[in-house]
Image (cartoon, rainbow, N blue to C red):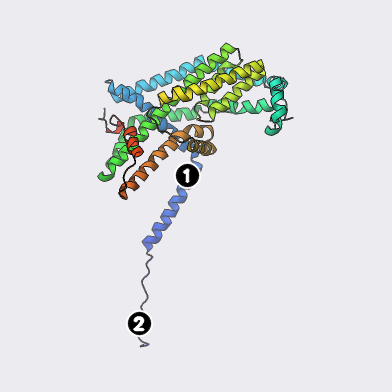
Amino acid sequence: MNDREPVVVPRSQVTVKTVLTVCATVAGVLAAIYLFIHGIVTLTLTVTAVLLAVALNHAVARLERGGLNRPLAIGLVMTVLLGLIVGMSFLIVPTAVTQVRDLIERLPELNKSLHETRLFQWLDARFHIDQRLGMLGKGSSGLFQEAVDPALRVVGGVLAGVGAFITVLFLVVFMLIYGGRVVRGSLAECLPAHRERYERVLGKVYTSVGGYLSGLAIIAVVNAFFATLFLAILGVPYFLPLGILSGLGSLIPLLGATVTGFVIALVGLASGGAWDFLAVGFYVLLYQQFENHVLAPIIYKRTVQLNPLVTLLGIILFAELAGVLGTFLAVPIVGTCQIVIRELLLLRRERLNLPLQGDVREQLQKHGPRRPPFWRRPRHA
């Protein structure tokens, strides 16, 4: 080997462009994580507005099919919604607030009456309720105070969320007006080979989530009405806030009705004794059977069907992330994820040339929109 032969240094495969790309990607991921952590409230409000806009758009679409143009249909739907909210505020809220104030003042008395009932003493002697819940000797309110406190925190959160409500309201209006244009513009930028699949996924999500939220609102109203009527006939005090609490419990699948039913039964036990407790318990069980086997199947004809275990895990996760509002948003978000995952699995089967299963074909026909989705409809001035 010649000593004078020049040494060839191999060219580096890592270019400056690659380094900058990696650095920019890492910085983008860190920025996204930072924004997610510090913008959880904004994200929650945005997701809430999107879900409400999807639900209200079903009513807007019905009015459009009746001959109204879209701006007028949106205005009519929002006017009816605000009218219902204002009407309930004048008719129900003052009485409910008064009864809630009286309930708070009587909590020590109700808790004492609760512990003196034979039924509670019998249950406590066999199951050690106070000891298990760690409430024994914790002041004058005790077990009953801890049972009612979550409901009182919900009421306080609702009263303190006026600003969030106004923000969501404006977001819903803008989404109803400009949401279709955004979806059409996004689909127009997709590759033609993928556009049909994206439209199918959006159609499934639109039909399932919108129908679910609309049906959930109907179920909550029916629950609140019958619970308030039953408690008023039974003579249970504070029947109005308890009836509203029962309706709010329907907004949280699987767990809400059970928790609110337990709270209402405790009030009946403390105020009227064992007979009121048994009557309320019997009513809660009877109404849950009616809601689960009659009312819900009729309303949820075309909505996404979720596995109860998946639903429960989703509720626990989103409750940890966003509290009570997270439990309300859990089912629509989990349902959307289920639709996307099913579509990805369907795409995988197509790429592997595997035959479609019978249930997959039925779901494609079931969840496909019968009418053109809102982003395919003609624009209105």
Q: Residue at x 73, y 30 (%)?
A: 136
**Looking at the picture, does residue 6 appear above or below residue 369?**
below
Q: Residue at x 51, y 16 (%)?
A: 226
Q: Position of residue 301 (x, y in %)?
A: 38, 27
Three-letter residue code for mark 1: Leu
Between residue 66 and residue 46, name the one nearer to us. Answer: 66
Residue 185 as seen in the image, left or right of residue 42: left
Q: Position of residue 78 (x, y in %)?
A: 39, 23
Residue 320 as seen in the image, left or right of residue 145: left
Mark 1 to mark 2: distance in Å? 53 Å
Q: Residue at x 44, y 54 (%)?
A: 26
Three-letter residue code for mark 2: Pro
Between residue 253 and residue 293, name the one nearer to us. Answer: 293
Residue 270 as seen in the image, left or right of residue 193: right
Q: Position of residue 6 (x, y in %)?
A: 35, 82
Q: Position of residue 282 (x, y in %)?
A: 57, 19
**Looking at the picture, does residue 65 appear above or below residue 338?**
above
Residue 6 as seen in the image, left or right of residue 111: left
Q: Is residue 328 visible?
A: yes
Q: Which residue is mark 2?
A: 6
Label at residue 35: 1
Q: Is residue 141 visible?
A: no
Q: Closer to the N terminus: mark 1 or mark 2?
A: 2
Between residue 123 and residue 10, name the one nearer to us. Answer: 123
